[in-house]
Amino acid sequence: MSRIQDCFARLGEQQRKALIPYITAGDPTLEVTVPAMHAMVEAGADVIELGVPFSDPMADGPVIQKACERALRAGTSLTRVLEMVGQFRRDNDTTPVVLMGYLNPVEIMGYARFADACVAAGVDGVLLVDLPPEECEDVAPLFRERGIDLIFLIAPTTTDARIRSIAAAASGYLYYVSVKGVTGSASLDVNEVAARVETIRNLAQLPIGVGFGIKDAQSAQAVSRVSDGVVVGSVLVSQAAEHEQHPEKIAPAMAAILADMRAAMDKP
Amino acid sequence: MTERPDYKAFPDQRGHFGQFGGRFVSETLMAALDELETMYRRLKDDPQFQADFDYDLAHYVGRPSPLYLAERWSRELGGARVWLKREDLNHTGAHKVNNTIGQALLAKHMGKKRVIAETGAGQHGVASATVAARLGLECHVFMGEEDIRRQRLNVYRMKLLGANVVPVTSGSRTLKDAMNEAMRDWVTNVDDTFYIIGTVAGPHPYPMLVRDFQAVIGREAREQCLKQAGKLPDALVACVGGGSNAIGLFHPFLNDDGVAMYGVEAAGDGIDTGRHAAPLSAGRPGVLHGNRTYLMEDDNGQIIETHSVSAGLDYPGVGPEHAWLKDLGRVQYVAANDQEALAAFRELTMVEGIMPALESAHAVAHARKLAPTMDKDQNIIVNLSGRGDKDILTVAEIDGIEF
Ligand SMILES: Cc1ncc(COP(=O)(O)O)c(C=O)c1O
């Protein structure tokens, strides 16, 4: 069983929901990321989505755009991000790590080389925002053969037919994007999310994580009640911006936010 | 020998030109692109839609645009006869309007009340604002801060036309960043918004539909050349930013084996300096803005900044059909640098009394090299994609003149 499957199975037995933080790797320095990953696990994170910075993050709002700029200025590259995962794995062999980003850095590295590097580093899943299932038929087997989960997004605009074909291409979990918009945009409507998650459940077997618009313990709790996991991004990433001059404060600040969310989500 | 492909049979059903093209966008936009494709495939063969499009091109844009024999300039160059396809004479001053007329008709059919556009030189922004004004649509144009400075005349034109010009401050503050921002707006407002992409880039079906709308250039030019020169041209020359004026001229000639084609990219300070905007000449394949194509990127797959005196060519990617035509060898992609383009701008202005846009001046610069290598009974068509009025401030600045 993969680390991701394992994780959702364990949470299921405990009747708990997954807390899935997203941070941009190398933001604002290369050194902060691995300690931040450990601190987030300590604070209750179940899966870590590690953002690979890209020069043109089209699906992201200003918070993550700036994070990409800071990370690239610090010298972050896909190779460096893979090294970070390897380093994280020295002290943590259980928490799944998903690389999230845009396709082009992977194109340049080459798909087979990237998939091999993921295995070597201990990456469990890959979410490429601008690679829809239609375009990944040729490369999907490279990941599947190596036991790496391909995570796909489902949007409010996704038709039922597409949900089925996305679910057929995906493994690990599905990521439901709760709002039409970029990351960090308007807050979500829990009732709407609940209805959509219900629809997806009827069409797909995989666990469903919900992201975009989760800002605090309250929204994390509300969304966790109607899904299998919550993805938290921009509020964490904004800590890197706020403490750019004092990077030692970043990991504790991220951990504090997650600890609050964890507590609220675990409340019966 | 492999047989040559039927160039006009592409893209395939999924929007691919060989390995290029496709639809690489986030999930939220997939439904909107499906909807657009379905609507376009239906209207494309609808005689009423084509009649509406043709009517607007004739009575609003002023088509057909002339094919003008630049006699004096041809004589000076001392080789082939050079003809100018006068897209500069279109309403709003460039080829861009052919496409915005077509896309605005699509927007109308789809019931969208709000249109957005990205722009570099401002010509596509002006052309979008123009059709929006005419149809009473709300219009937002995304434009990099650097381009707002360079093309302030066009910024004011767009404002007069009632458009909201949104300054883009991210990244290199030029065309690619404006396109990122337009995509972000579209994701957010996808229900009521039509995104009018200004060139043959972006996700499928944009490269196909923009090409189809611009192909009026080549259809006219082919007919005019047969009539005026008595035969098909020997060579076509067009500048390539995203590639819409070039593919518009080239496409109707692609299966005419005897017609050579040259796409001219912006070499900026020179290809060897790295400061240019010539992905076909010096880039490599990758994925940006929804399609796979040649890009200017570093070893880590990050897009790098481009440099060109011409805002409309300052783009790190290029339409996927050009990437495909390059690899097939059907079109030759060459480059002209800032100095050559400026010299061509001045020369055409002085010799023919026609002031080309700095974008078009890149094509003029290549024709200037090409014509003398050809015979006097041969014919070259240069796509004069736009007029140079918008660039007067840029040229004056280079001349050290302040207004
Ligand atoms: C006059 C003119 N020519 C050419 C271009 C380049 O675009 P494309 O390569 O799509 O024709 C522009 C873009 O702004 C333009 O304004």
Image (spheres, rainbow, N blue to C red):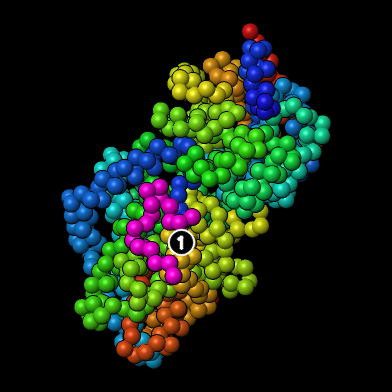
Which residue, given by chain and number where applicable, does mark 1 sit on? B324
Which residue: 31% across, 62% down?
Answer: B215
Front residue of this view, candidates B373 and B326: B326
The part of the image, by quadrant, that contains residue A247 is top right
Q: Is residue B31 visible?
A: yes
Q: Is residue A209 left or right of residue A10?
A: left
Which residue: 61% across, 33% down?
Answer: A149
Q: Is residue A241 visible?
A: no
> Of helix, strand and loop, which mostly describes the magenta segment?
loop
Q: Amino acid at mark 1?
A: Trp
Q: Secondary structure at mark 1?
A: helix
Query: Is residue B252 highlighted in magenta?
Result: no
* Residue B229 locus on image (x, y percent): 25, 82
Q: How many marks?
A: 1
Residue at the extreme front:
B1
Compared with residue B276, is residue A34 higher up or lower down, i.e. above or below?
Answer: above
Which residue: 78% across, 34% down?
Answer: A89
What residue span does the magenta drawing correspond to? Answer: B1-19
Residue at the extreme top:
A268
Which residue: 69% across, 36% down?
Answer: A123
* Residue A6 locus on image (x, y percent): 67, 23
Q: Is residue A21 left or right of residue B291?
A: right
Front residue of this view, candidates B235 and B108: B235
Query: Is residue B15 highlighted in magenta?
Result: yes
